[in-house]
Image (cartoon, rainbow, N blue to C red):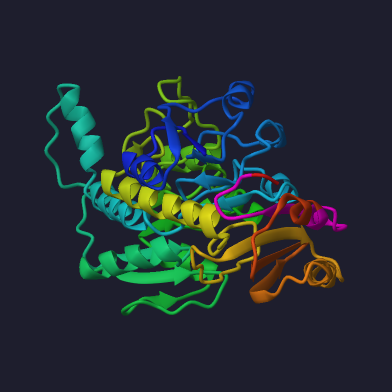
Amino acid sequence: MKVLLLESISGVAASQFEEAGFEVESLKGALDERELVEKVRGTSILGVRSKTRITAAVLDAAPELVSVGAFCIGVDKIDRAASSDRGIGVFNDPHSNSRSVAELAMGEIILLMRRTFEASTQLHGGVWNKSSAGSHEVRGLTLGIVGYGKIGSQVSDLAEAMGMRVVFHDLTHVLARGNARAVSFRELLETSDVITLHVDGKVQNQDLFGEDELRGMKDGACLINLSRGFVVDHEALARHLKSGKLAGAAVDVFPQEPESGGAFSSPLKGLPNVILTPHVGGSTEEAQQNIGQFVSARMIDYFKSGNSLLSVNLPHCHLDYDPGSHRLMHIHHNVPGILRAINDILADREINIERQVLDTRGALGYAIYDINRDCDEPLLAKLRAVPHTIRVRMPGEARG
């Protein structure tokens, strides 16, 4: 049982895997497809962060792979369709770094409104420019939050505690926190002194803030993007900052991001009152430790019991597991007749089903069985031969 962890995933994850009986190899950096195809052979569990791309070729190189963990929020670098086709569970952590991102957003709001970053840059260059021009308290200002999920709602709480008025816009109906108020997208643009973006990586959010949206913002407002790089048109943002239409910006995510230590290029470089950070919104030790604990726990549970709760690609199945039970898991295409075929095989061998659960998700079906005798190889072979079967597995085993 081998675990491969890339991109300096928290040592908490490695410790949890080792305590669960896995052999763990941890690497500091990301690997490209060719390197990963070689490295992943024989791996049962693979853990990555935001730089490693998991392609179908990588998955094919590891027939024993049971699950892939994104030790972050985003899973856009993982081919989830290919993972599902191979019966591989994909897990992430949509929660644990939300506080870190929210705190950075709040800190940048204060720095932008006080023009602290610009003053610091000037002073590093030897220029003493003490002035109150363009510097404002955040108390009494209006903060517009686009995307009122786990992060956006925490920013709302922090901003209101600082005395800001909070308005927000979200495509789904969500409960407002405190005195925050839901408004139309257009009203948010026109009334907010600061706008902070906390949307997900869905395709429809591509260029969410382009020329028209930036032009529609309040004169002298500031923009913060800690969500996805493709959400904002950086060329248009740079134009509006240079013209004075916008007073400042803070950007943590970019359409193209180099590897660590690589050369960085952006039309926003060198602009005053623009804070640029290298995708570190969730990069605190606390967040990485929490993510390491959360994702590794989900993956260990799935490997040992088959429970797939919080998987981003598999149906969500949970069946309380007694380590003495004889359990088998069956991932299949979601077509009629699968359960009947499985039940007939078990009945023909006079095997009793003690407990079972089934769920479906799109084209996938997933069933967990507890039966009254051990699964021998002839039984597993019959189950794997059921038409439309993707993967049959027992707890603690990687075979497909």
Q: Would residue 91 be found to the left or right of residue 60 on screen?
A: left
Residue at position x 54%, y 60% from top?
A: 305
Q: Residue at x 23, y 60 (%)?
A: 138
Q: Position of residue 159 (x, y in %)?
A: 28, 65
Task: Name above or below for residue 311 compared with residue 123.
Answer: below
For the magenta stretch, what is the residue range? 382-398
Q: Indicate the position of residue 322 as horizontal and vertical percent values.
A: 49, 68
**Pick the front one: 220 or 192:** 192
Magenta-colored stretch includes residue 299: no
Residue 221 visible here:
no
Residue at the image position 60 percent from the left and 48 percent from the top: 207
* Residue 223 in view, yes or no: yes
Q: Position of residue 37 (x, y in %)?
A: 64, 26
In this rendering, the answer to whether 24 lies above or below 378 is above
Task: Give 156 or 356, whichever is nearer the viewer.
Answer: 356
**Residue at 52% in and 69% down:** 170
Name the image quarter holding residue 124: top left
Horizontally, residue 96 falls left or right of residue 108, namely right
